[in-house]
Image: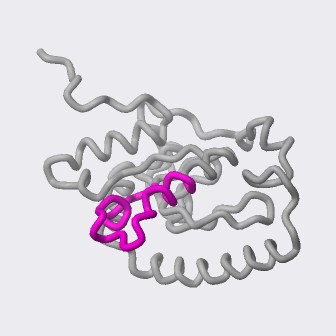
Amino acid sequence: MSRGGDDRTGAGRRAGTQPPRSTPREMPKEREERVTGPYPRPRTERERAINRRQERTEEKKADLRRAHPSVPEQQMIGALAVLGERYGEDYYHDAKIKDGDWYITHADFVWRQDGLIVEVYGGPHYKPELDPTGTRQEKDERMIATLQSVGWTVLIVYDYEMTRDTWTTVVEKVEHFLNQEPAPVAGQEDER
């Protein structure tokens, strides 16, 4: 069953979920006052051409990732299925994120109507031996800040969190994020 209350037959609503938004989400006022994106100045025609070229290149890569998701992405697809989230109806995998006509990035799992993104980080995002330039974490932090500056809310789930022992915790964490509830903190459960 999806957060919108539809199961495969289209009936019912899970208890404790929020109704789907009927109006598009409002963007922060500061976004309306900017030109576009996190940049304070208009972009040059050369910058726009480079951005369009980058968008085409990244779209080709995204097509391959959609056809062959990584193991952590496959695990997240499974977690989303457990929550009743449907690909193509509730969320999109490896979806293009733009601010107006400016390409920003492709994000792992995107709920456009709700302005939510779940990023699944594997080893190259946090293991120094898989980051030859040593700049991956800084690049990731800048990208998350850019996404947030244009109105997206982002949850990062690491591949090492998705083990048999912690599977339920990850599913709950994602469910709380999608319903915009505070996630339970590990180790602070009721002791009864």
The residue positioned 25% from the left and 51% from the top of the image is 161
* Magenta-highlighted residues: 119-143
Residue at coordinates 32% horizontally, 54% vertically from top-left?
Answer: 158
Residue 21 as seen in the image, left or right of residue 139: right
Can you give x and y, in whole percent of width and height, for residue 171 in the image? 31, 46
Residue 123 part of the magenta segment: yes
Using the image, determine if residue 21 lies above or below residue 104. above
The residue at 58%/48% (across/down) is 145
Q: How many marks?
A: 0
Report whether 103 appears left or right of 81: right
Q: Position of residue 74 (x, y in %)?
A: 33, 67
Rendered image quadrant of residue 122: bottom left
Percent coordinates x, y for residue 68 in the rendering: 39, 80
- Quarter of the C terminus within the rendering: top left
Q: Is residue 80 left or right of residue 91?
A: left
From the viewer's side, name the closer residue of 187 and 44: 44
Pinpoint residue 189: horizontal percent, then vertical percent: 21, 23
> Was residue 111 drawn as part of the magenta stretch in this picture?
no
On screen, 100 above or below 156?
below
What colouring method underlies this structural image? one colour
- Residue shown at 27% from the left, 69% from the top: 129
Residue reaching furthest to the top: 192
Q: Nearer the viewer, residue 117 or 125?
A: 125
Viewer-closest of 79 and 134:
134
Farthest-out residue, front: 133
Toward the viewer: 102 or 125? 125
